Amino acid sequence: MVWLWRVLAATCIGLGAVGIILPGLPTTPFLLVAAWAGARGWPALEARLLQHPHYGPLILDWRQRRAVPRRAKWAASALMLLSATMIWLLPAPHWLRIGLPLFLLGVAAWLWTRAEPSRKVD
């Protein structure tokens, strides 16, 4: 079972790394999942993620308070708006043109109801 947690953690690290390079693919959610999976099967990786100067505080804020920095909320909202706009500009099935913006609106509403960290996060 440990190897399944490690595969999940490694896959999420890889997707997070791609997200650093590829605009529109979020990095932090993948690192949150990687730390979660690492806690179950790869403690050394979890510790390394928690000690990371940029992502460590974000992971700890999420774990302790389910907190998301305001800057991340704005960035995610802007990317969701861009995605919804693109789905209207490109050929897409009608159900997707209606469903995706509604889904993203729900995600944005959920995201903006999350707490914000008490300390400043870059």
Image: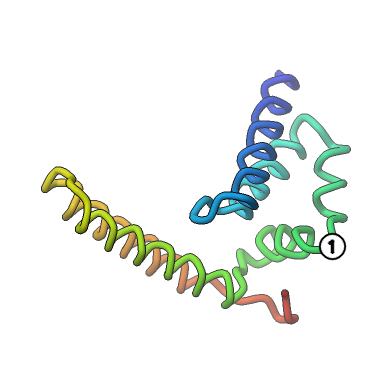
- Characterize the local packing of mark 1: few (<14), some (14-19) or many (20 or more) Cα atoms within 10 angstroms: few
| Color scheme of the displayed model | rainbow
Q: Is residue 75 left or right of residue 84?
A: right
Q: Residue at x 22, y 51 (%)?
A: 90
**Percent x, y for residue 50?**
82, 53
Quadrant containing the C terminus in the rendered view: bottom right
Q: Is residue 73 left or right of residue 44?
A: left
Above or below residue 81? Residue 11 is above
The kind of residue tagged 1 is: Pro
Instruction: Give the image quarter of residue 105.
Output: bottom left
Q: Is residue 109 left or right of residue 114?
A: left
Q: Residue at x 75, y 59 (%)?
A: 55
Instruction: Residue under label 1, please give it.
Output: 53
Q: Residue at x 83, y 39 (%)?
A: 45
Q: Residue at x 17, y 47 (%)?
A: 91
**Percent x, y for residue 56?**
79, 59
Count all numbered tags in the image, as a single digit.
Answer: 1
Disc 1, SS: loop
**Percent x, y for residue 24?**
49, 55
**Percent x, y for residue 116?**
61, 76
Residue at the left extreme of this rendering: 94
Quadrant containing the N terminus in the rendered view: top right
